[in-house]
Image: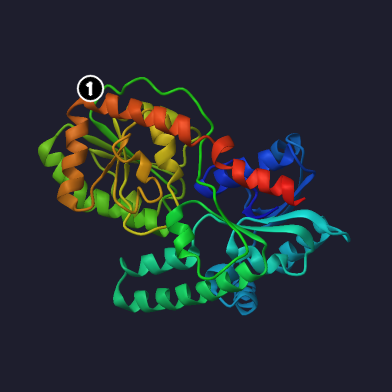
Amino acid sequence: MVCKFVPFPDNSGGRQRSLAIARRLASRFDLALCAFDDGEAAIAGLEAMGVEVHAVPWRSSPAALVAGVARARTVSAGRFCHPRLLAAVRQAAGTGPLDVLFVGYPQLAPMARGVGARLRVLDFQNIESALVASYASTRPAFLAGAMRAEASALRRLERRALGDFHLATVVSEVDRRRLPGPTAEVLVCPNGIEPAAALPPAAGPVAIFVATMGWAPNVDAALWLGRSVWPRVQRRLPGARLLIVGRDPHRDVLALAGPNIEVTGTVVDVRPYLAAARVALAPLRAGGGTRLKVLEALLAGRPTVATTIGAEGLADLVGRGVVVADREEDLAEAIVGLMANGGRAEALGRAGHEAVTARYSWDRTLAPLLDRMQRGS
C-alpha cells in the first residue's frame, strides 16, 4: 500500500480513508505500507495493527520539487515524486510479484511503475484534475489560468495511470463520471465512518465548521463563511457563535477570530466542539470527493448545512441530516432556522445519525473493494 503520509494519527480526511483501508487490509493480507512521515507519524500504532511500515522523511525543497515535477509532469504530483519513496516501494515489494498493489492517490502512481502485482488498484480519493479545475472558479484571473493548466496536466497523469492499473476505486458516482479515460474495472467505494453513539443535544445557538484549515478549498470556504455568510446570521441571531475547528489554519482564517467567531487551530479531539454545536457546516465552493467531516457531524447527531459542493456524493443524505443551500442569504437562512429551533435541529441530527450508521460504516463502504482484492489475489 502506497499513500502520501503515514495515516496514523488519522487527523485529516485523506488519512482517515487510508487508515480505514490499511486496518482492513492488514486483517486479510501481510501488509507493507509506504508513505512519507511529516513528523506526526505514530508508526508503533500501525505496527501494533500488524502493518509493516516503510516511512520516508517528508523533506520538501525547491530542488526536490523541480526534480519531482520533471518526473511527474505536474506540480501537485511532483511534490510526492521523490527517489526515497520510490526506493521504499521497491524495497517493500521485494523481488516476487505481489498479490495486491494498492496506490492511494493518482499522484503517487509514478512511484509504483514497474512493481509487479496480480492486482494493481488505484484509489481516487478525489479526481484531482477536477478538484484543481474547481479552484480556478474562485481565484483571480492571473491564478485561474495556472490552475487550469495544472488541471490539464493532472488529467493527463490520471489517464496514464488508469492504463497501468487493473482496478480503479472512486468515492461516488459523480467521481466515476469524472474519470478521464477507460479502465478495466471501476468500483464506487464511498467514504465512511466507524460507528459510534450520537452526542446529546447542544444547549445553545452554536455552529461549527470542521476542516483542515490550511487546504485551499477549506480556506476559501472559511473566509466566505466568516466574511459574507456569518454577518447575515448575526443580524438575525445576535447570540449565535461560530467555531472554526481544524489544523494548520491559514493566517486569513486566524484573522476571522472575534467575539462571535472562535478559530481553534489543531485540537486533540473534535467531539467536545461538536458537542457544543447545534449545527455543523460544509460551505465549500470548490472541491471534490465526499466530505468525511459531514459524515462525522451526522454520526455525532449534528445536522449539517452544506453547499451543493459540500454535500457532493451524499445525495441520499439530503433531507436526512443534510440541508443544501448555495447562495449567501439561503445559507444564512438555513443556519438560523436550525439554530433557533433546537427541536428541529435535534430531529434532523437524529435522522442523520441513523442514516450514516446504516449506510456509511467503513465495513459496508469498503466491502466491494476488499472482496475484489481477496478474489484478485
Measuring from the top left, give residue 178's x and y in whole percent. Answer: 45, 64
Q: Is residue 16 above or below residue 351?
A: below
Query: What residue lies at 37% left-to-right and 41% top-to-bottom?
Result: 316
Residue 333 placement: quadrant? top left
The structure residue drawn at horizontal position 61% and vertical position 73%, both measured from the top left corner, is 160
Circle 1 crowding by C-alpha within 10 Å: few under 14, some 14–19, many from 20: few
Is residue 7 visible to us here? no
Callout 1 amino acid: Gly
Residue 219 occupies quadrant: bottom left
The chosen color scheme is rainbow
Residue positioned most to the right: 95
Does 29 sit left or right of 24 as displayed? right
Residue 195 lies left or right of residue 80; in this view the side is left
Residue 350 x/y as whole percent: 34, 25
Q: Decide if residue 26 is on the left or right side of residue 137.
A: right
Asked if one can make out residue 16 in the rendered structure from this viewpoint, the answer is yes
Disc 1 marks which residue? 343
Q: Position of residue 291 (x, y in %)?
A: 43, 47
**Nearer to the camera, 87 or 40:** 87
- Between residues 69 and 28, which one lies in front from this camera angle? 28
Badge 1 element: helix
- As drawn, the residue found furthest toward the left would be 235
Q: In this view of the protein, which residue sits in the foreground, 29 or 108?
A: 29
In the foreground, 156 or 319 = 319
Query: Taking 231 as reference, is 260 above or below it?
Result: above
Look at 59% across and 42% down and name the residue there. 366
Badge count? 1
Percent position of residue 301, x then y: 37, 28
**Picture quadrant where residue 207 is located:** top left
In this picture, is 145 found above or below 254? below
Task: Identify the residue at image location x=47%, y=76%.
Answer: 152
